[in-house]
Amino acid sequence: MSGAGVRRVLAAASALALAAVLAACGSSSGSGSGSTLIFADVAPFSGVDAALGPIYLVSCTGTTQAINKAGGILGHKVACKPVDTRGEPADAVPAVGSLLSTTPNLALVIGCTSDEAASVVPVLNQHKTVMFCMTGQSEFDHVKFPYFYRLVPPDLAESYAMTVIAKDLGYQRIALAFGNDIGSQTFVQPAVAAIAKAGLKLVANETLDEHATTFRTEAAKIVAAHPDAIMTEALGNADPTLFAEIKQLNGGHMIPIVGTSALISPAFYAAAAKAIGAATFSKIFHADNLVTATSGPAYNAFTSALLAVKNSHLPGEQTGNFSTYFSAPGAVHLYDGMTLAALAMVAAHSTDVAKWKPWIVSIGDGVPGAVVVNSFAQGVAELRAGKKIRYVGPGGPTVFDAFHDSPGIFQIDTYSATGTVVVAGNISAAQLRSVIP
Amino acid sequence: VSLLVESVGFGLITAAVLSIAAVGFTLQFAVTNVLNLAFAAVMTGGAFITYAVNQAGGSVWLGVLAAMAAGAAISVLLNYLVYAPFQARGAAPITLVIVSLGMALIIEFGIGAWTGGIGVSYTMSQGSTVRLGGLVLTTVQLLIMAISVVVMASVHGLLRYTKLGKAMRATAANRMLARNCGIRASRVIGLTWALTGALSGLAGTVFAIDVGTFTSTSTDIFLILILAAVFLGGPGNAYGAMLGGVVIGVATEVSAAYLQADYKYVIAFVILLAMLAVRPSGLLGARA
């Protein structure tokens, strides 16, 4: 059995044991008056995906400060707690176990990326903890976890979106270069199928060991295949290192890149720009991303919340262009998830999860006669006025299905030479359907 | 054929870095009797010292000197404060291995806490691209190979032609007998920690130059390659470590060219296991 296989078995065994213990212990049923509610950021803060947790923490800290500034939730202040999963299922389960046993006022979990979702979602669900997860794994499309919510699309939809971008830009010969972690590998098979459906040619398919320090031979194979573009997601140092080596081996010319939405982050931009030069990177890079607001009241409330925590020296906070957070999926959609959860508690007049959970969908999707609100403060004011509300945040309106998935629609993002995210276009539903195998 | 030539060239760059580290590691093990798994963490420390110098406006090459000094100091302190007290109390070799593993984690996480766990790069030019046959190398990569050759030659000169080198070989072969012959073994051991620590700092910096972007945990997988090179060549044998570094470096890159690339480190260990099955003492035999 491989190391990853052993880790998966250990994680599954640990998860089962932990779930059994937690089932015996029961679940949270509301917090004492005036106590601080905790939003836990369960995500990698170390390991190859270490960039993810800090993005969510910036969003969490900004959101909770905005909630506190508006009076908190039913008299409770809200605070964030980072929980490092190291991006490994076997590390994530004990980390979540520790979180659950030491955090009596745990109100919400955010994060839960594809690295650890499969192992921690059942545990959190068993504990009746509402979670807004950033996983794209397709198993959550059809397995029901009542406490699981997702505002991002399944990974295969991102693979289709990347294929549409490549086709739209006129690229015919495609190379794939995805990391060997769970989250990145889920893109590969849908991408292979979509490339074939779109009539494009797959000329190379390299799997990058994200713990490796160089990818020279992989880069040489890609260059030798003469692709028009490379579709990729290999987080940590892997992609920037690969880009630098491709540029070196390709006579100083960089091959165009089509990335996933995970590559929209300050840390990734900084590393990639350093590797091949900001001007070059900004010219050759495109990524799919969910459509998010770039102006308007929801966007203004969101950016104000995040800007309030700029230079707060949060754990793992990344240097680079801070405005990149305004387009980072983890920052936008988790902000929406946290705001939705907070408004649900206020609407339910309770922090008892059994009472407020049903309000998530009704406030997100709206009910007849609901007033649209774009921030926590605005929502609380309308609720106090006795009105029904529908929250529409910077990530746009939600449409939850039976599995609590609310996949949005895609846009095409690029970076400017200073690292600001620029929207280059949109992907229509028809375009997406045209490449679905 | 072109891919084969390219991958051999890439393997030689990896081998250049690996050999410097493997020689330092194996010399340290041979003379001090400590299989120091914190070696790669000290390398990381050296890489970040150079980064600090570079960020302060100094050149990377100036940083190399600082990294070597820091590597030597950290290694001497590690021995003085941690390993030597354990050895004095009769700790078994496997105990020291576990202690060194703990030190590796402490150093790595300490660096991570200092740097924030974010990937960093040196501000330096990679130089112009040079084409040699089917190889495409930068001048910096050629320089790394040159540094490695100089280090290998220097280690050879040290071990063969200097009093310290001979004393190191004698202490490695039989510490008690060396003492009886008038060699001040404890002093030799202290100097060995300093010397191999300096090699560790140097290896860390050339590693960081080679990979471009690095973090506090970047050398984790590299430690595995160091161990493979050392045991392939014959543990404790400096020349074996040089040879092991070349074999492992080239094998990983060539295998990546023809097999699934993310299995390249697995291939290195298949070679190691096959070699040890045929020749358990490694390519160049028993400890020097």
Image: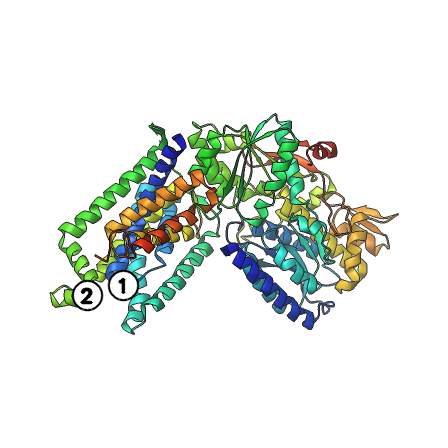
Where in the figure is residue B174, as x and y percent of width and height? 19, 64
Residue at 52% x, 45% y: name it.
A319
Mark closest to the chain's N terminus, 2 or 1: 1
Element class at badge 2: helix
- The residue labelled by disc 1 is B33
* Residue A245 rendering spot, x and y as whole percentages: 44, 35
* Residue type at numbered disc 2: Arg
Q: Nearer the viewer, residue B17 or A294?
A: B17
Q: Is residue A339 left or right of residue B24?
A: right
Label 1: how many Cα within 10 Å (few below 14, some 14–19, many 20+): some
Residue at the extreme right: A369
From the image, tell me which residue sits under label 2. B175
Vertical order, B221 against B121 (above or below): below
> How would you rate the neighbour count of disc 2 (Cα within 10 Å): few for under 14, some for 14-19, many for 20 or more?
many
Is mark 2 in CB contact (under 8 Å) with mark 1? Answer: yes
x, y percent for residue B87 = 29, 70
Judged left or right of residue A314, residue B238 is left
Counting the numbered discs, the total is 2
